[in-house]
Image (cartoon, rainbow, N blue to C red):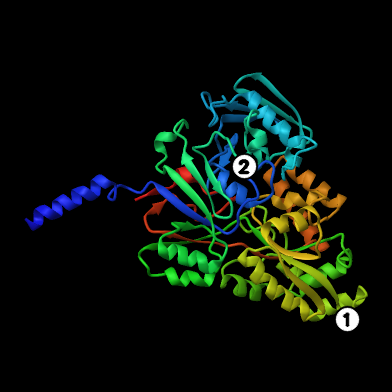
Amino acid sequence: MRSLMLVVGLAALLASGAGAAKDSVTIGLAVEPPGLDPTAGAAAAISEITWLNIYEGLTRIDEAGTVLPNLAESWSAEDARTYTFKLKRGIAFHNGTALTAATVKYSFTRSAADTSTNKRKRVFANIAAIDTPDDFTAKITLKQPSSLLPFFFAEATAAIVAPDTAEGDATNPVGTGPFRFGKWTRGDSVSLEKFAGHRNAGAVKLARATFRFVGDPSAQVAALLAGDLDYVPFMGGLEAVERFKGDPRFQILVGATEGETLVGINNQRAPFTDVRVRRAVNLALDRKAIIAGVNGGFGQPIASHATRSNPYYLDLLATFPYDPAQAKRLLAEAGFPNGFETAFKLPPQAYARRGGEIVAALLGEVGIRAKIEPIEWAQWLDVVFRQKNYGLTVIMQPEPWDIFNYTDPNYFYQYDSAAFRELMKEAEASPTPAEAKARFQAAQRKLADDAVNAWLFEFPKVSVARTGLKGLWRNAPMAVYDLAAMRWE
């Protein structure tokens, strides 16, 4: 009788679904995005939720950073100025709109428009013409050659959007991806649902995904332990990772990113208009101490805008050794023997708040009184990024090839160098990898010589996930969490 009752009880559990394979995932993100259109906003949190999930591009990259076909089944290049993309057939947006070459033309023309707020606008403004000889062919002619165009089209900023829904994508995103928008509960979460009409729907194992916004490192740990989160791609408090070691319920993944963590300097606000002051900021910073204090030792120091995973990385650490005495001398030469005070505005991310405190203490030792002002993410995007109303800040720039941001004098660093722009123009147009390497490295050296920012470290990717969740990227070549690759075992 006891055995019969156990069998009956087990059957009841299975019938109720308790024994069914898990088909959903809950992911913890540190910040909430300001919108859900990656072609219109700068925050990496937008692409973390939407890229490869809701939206897709002509190309995509894998975890190694290799460019692969996506909405385009293939592409060819006559030279670095003319590219032809052949689209896959039978693809529809979540609302039923068919994908055609005209849709591609619309998307890229929109991102190049005067009203565009696309953070890669320069890529689309460089397009001279888009010809569509048939519904599945887009021939793109550039004003200036770019050997990196297929890679740029693999970024979220190159998302293909539908003309009939694009204007509402910030709050009700519509794409061609394997997941469709479900619900956005402001201040809490964004939920997505599997799109049954996707061309690879049969291979997608998850039915639902929820991105919850959990910025506090302690809250991340508590939510993981309570089972409220299945995966935190970037742990805010890396010392807390020790809590999960040896616990069979969890897996820890340590990898690299393309993220350059830096002290952002407003190059158009005195006294930072003087290169000697900017160099003094760099020399005042003990990068190893900052890495230890912020990341528990995870991460590698950098002194210009590139990480070691970039094939053209140049080690420039010798440019800025930790030398507070030299920093004081430079400040005195610049007319600040007693230092000065500046506004130090810090966004809410743990690395920024923790790093900012250490940076402020180190700057204080050479006479720079960095007045810390903690602000929320929406405020940072408005006050620092858009209005440029700051002296110093701390931020991580997560996108590959975001060194191109320095070609825009209106970007929030406000760095204006015709010589740098020419170096980058030549590098992008380089016909061979060897020439590209020489020029991109010259560009890195130029940024270091001009001490545009004070670069700190490569941002490490230290993740904690529930055991059994597969398909996770150990490394982060860009800000993306590919839900279609995830599954439970």
Query: Which residue does the image show at 64% across and 46% down from the upper left?
Result: 35
Tell me how far mark 2 sits from mark 1, CA to CA: 50 Å
Q: Which residue is mark 1?
A: 338
Few, some or many C-alpha atoms within 10 Å of disc 2 (few <14, some 14-19, many ≥20)? Answer: some
Q: Quadrant of the N terminus?
A: bottom left
Label total for image:
2
Residue 258 is situated, as x and y percent measured from the top left of the image, at 62, 55
Query: Which residue does the image show at 49% across and 54% down from the upper left?
Result: 27
Looking at the image, is 277 positioned above or below residue 194?
A: below
Nearer-N-terminus badge (2/1): 2
Residue 488 is situated, as x and y percent measured from the top left of the image, at 37, 50
The answer to whether any part of residue 486 appears in the image is: yes
Query: Which residue does the image show at 55% across and 54% down from the upper left?
Result: 188
Three-letter amino acid code at the position of disc 1: Asn
Q: Quadrant of residue 296?
A: bottom right
Q: Which residue is mark 2?
A: 171
Q: Quadrant of residue 126?
A: top right
Query: Which residue does the image show at 15% across and 50% down from the upper left?
Result: 8
Classify residue 250 as left or right of residue 280: left
Closer to viewer: mark 2 or mark 1:
2
